[in-house]
Image (spheres, rainbow, N blue to C red):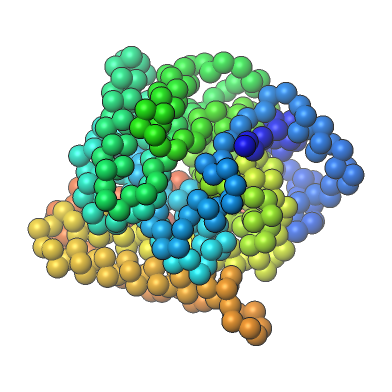
Amino acid sequence: MFRKLPMARWMRLPMLVLAIAVPAAAMGCAGADQAPADPDPSGAAQQRAQDADGEVVVTPLVDEGGVHEFLQRGDRVLFLGDDVTQQMFYTQATAAGLLALMPRQELRFFNGGRNGSSAADAVEWAPDLLELTRPTVVFVLFGLHEGLAGQDQPQQTLETYRRGLSDLAQVVGRHESVRRVIVASPLPAATLAVEVGPPTGANVLMSRMAEATVEVAREQGVGYVNLFEFMRQVYIAGNIGAGARMTFENGLPTEEGHVVIASALMAAMGVTAQDLEAIGWSPLPPRRMHRVRQVLAIAASPPDEALAARSRALYTTLTLHDERFFRAWRLAGRSRSVPERRRAMAHADEAWRHVQLVAMSYYAPPDGPAPAMVQPLPMPPHPGADEQDTADPGDTPQAPQGTDSPDGPPAWPAPNEHGGMTP
């Protein structure tokens, strides 16, 4: 069972890896995304696009039953990764979609991204994280950091990545709480290509690492998502137009790029266009969401303004939980005070209860009028001096810098000069 993503449909969206704004003429009026009117209401153009060559395949991880088969009540989902995961955006966008679809299922999501890390490194630090989070479903996404850093020694980089990923899959799969493991291929390096063809430049190594990911998934009997080829096609499509910026100069995806990644992960989990339309999934402000909607792995129509606003509110609410969990895992965990970690986790648990309140009030309300927007929780105090002394200066959750969108960058947290955000 496959979900095919037509290249021809992507080509209709003006989009550029190194960002130019969408022209005002492209900002039509339908739906919360202000999408232009469909020039072909019969749908014939869409059918022709689906029949075109150059399609990319995202394979769902469940044969039938969709996301409600993939996830079970009470699942705890952990995203393990490097700098890309620590940016937090694709994990929050994915969680916002799944919580809206399954508000009563008592799901929980954890961001286990560690900047500058590799799969081999994670073999050492993942056990502590697994004990802290007790996940049932684990997504593993490494490779971009080590692939870009290892271009001068490609064979050694490839072998180290493959061995590390295989060892990590075993460590995660052996944990008593884990029911399902999914490995995703590395993201591609930003490319200047303007037509579909074999990978070139830095992506030669990245493509070999993606192939190694498939091999590891088969050997370990775990799930697999091909993010490399999917996002490479997105980058190529963007090089022939002008629109949303998908990557920074250092290769990390922008917030728009993360939303596209989240759509691919949800497609692999069995989420459908009908699912996203029912909840109005729209993590970004309308104009920014419009710039990426046509390259999403799930071709959902723009939502109305009320649904879009609720989706963004849930998405932004997740940030506080991720920041508090980061403190429990990476800051309080560096001190030798067990009570300090427990206290930090209690703060994270409090933030998650607020996330659940938002999801329930928006997507599973009791009978009666539509709920008002739930007010955000206040930020907790910063770690004490003892915690700050034990933290590595590099241990800051990284987020992309502000975009060129007229809507401006996310209001919180503010990026530092390196594109990271400091708790």
> Which one is in front, 140 or 291?
140
Q: Is residue 280 left or right of residue 401?
A: right
User: Looking at the image, which residue sits at the far left?
Assistant: 336
Report the residue at 52% width, 16% height from top: 200
Dividing the picture into quadrants, the one containing residue 304 is bottom right
Q: In which quadrant of the rendered image does the C terminus lie? A: bottom left
User: Looking at the image, which residue sits at the far bottom?
Assistant: 368
Measured as percent of width and height from the top left, residue 108 is found at: 41, 61
Is residue 116 in sight in this rendering? no
Q: Is residue 353 left or right of residue 98?
A: left
Report the residue at 13% width, 63% height from top: 338
User: Looking at the image, which residue sits at the far front?
Assistant: 64
Q: Is residue 391 left or right of residue 168?
A: left
Report the residue at 31% width, 19% height from top: 159
Report the residue at 54% width, 44% height from top: 62
Measured as percent of width and height from the top left, residue 93 is found at: 51, 53
Q: Is residue 231 above or below residue 69?
A: above
Is residue 343 in sight in this rendering? yes
Dividing the picture into quadrants, the one containing residue 16 is top right
